[in-house]
Amino acid sequence: GRGAGRGGRGPAGGRRAPPRGLYRRVYRGDGTALPDFSALEPVESRVAAPVGRPEGPAGEREARVFDGFLQVPEDGLYSFELSSDDGARLWLHEALVVDHDGLHSTSEKRGSAALARGLHPIRVAWFNKTGGATLGLSVARDGGEWMPVPAGWLVR
């Protein structure tokens, strides 16, 4: 019958899609740059999507790390924009793609990576000392329009 060549389990050939969302860990601290997370214990761990600032009131003296995979739909040159208040960094395959660390008001920094279709390890780290709390991650492919990274691209 139809689909027998793929195990008859539907269009994905029987493979399950990775679960949506990234692992998010929240830390407390009072620094002027991103901390050494390996030396800290998180106060909260859960799955979250999309990458973003704290829900509700701004989290002062707080840092967050988002880990998982970025699932891109096509080969291409992907540009990423981190908008943050205070510092943030983006890694793909453990390579630093955007470095926007330090104390600053809401601003953006960009970086690019050539990515093949499929899954790529991603990590976003962010901290807020006091005041405003902003974190956003946008993407553009091959010089196209900027958009927030779709929630379906963030998986674990």
Image (cartoon, rainbow, N blue to C red):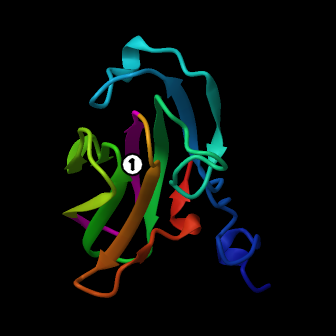
Residue closer to the observer: 12 or 64:
64
Q: Which residue is mark 1?
A: 122
Q: Is 136 one of the magenta-colored residues?
A: no
Query: Of all residues shown, which one is farthest toward the top?
Result: 39
Residue span colored magenta? 113-129
Residue at 51% across / 22% down in the picture?
28
In the image, residue 84 lies at what x, y percent?
A: 36, 53
Residue at 52% across / 15% down in the picture?
41
Residue closer to the observer: 108 or 121:
108
SS majority, magenta: strand
Residue 121, visible in the rendered structure = yes
Q: Amino acid at mark 1?
A: Ile
In the image, residue 27 lies at what x, y percent?
A: 51, 25
Residue 118, visible in the rendered structure = no
Where is the N terminus found, in terms of image quarters? bottom right
Left or right: 3 in relation to 115 = right
Q: Is residue 146 above or below residue 36?
A: below
Left or right: 110 in relation to 122 = left
| 10 Å crowding of disc 1: few (<14), some (14-19), many (20+) | many
Q: Quadrant of residue 137?
A: bottom left
Residue at 64% across / 61% down in the picture?
17
Q: Quadrant of residue 147?
A: bottom left
Query: Of all residues shown, which one is farthest toward the front?
Result: 131
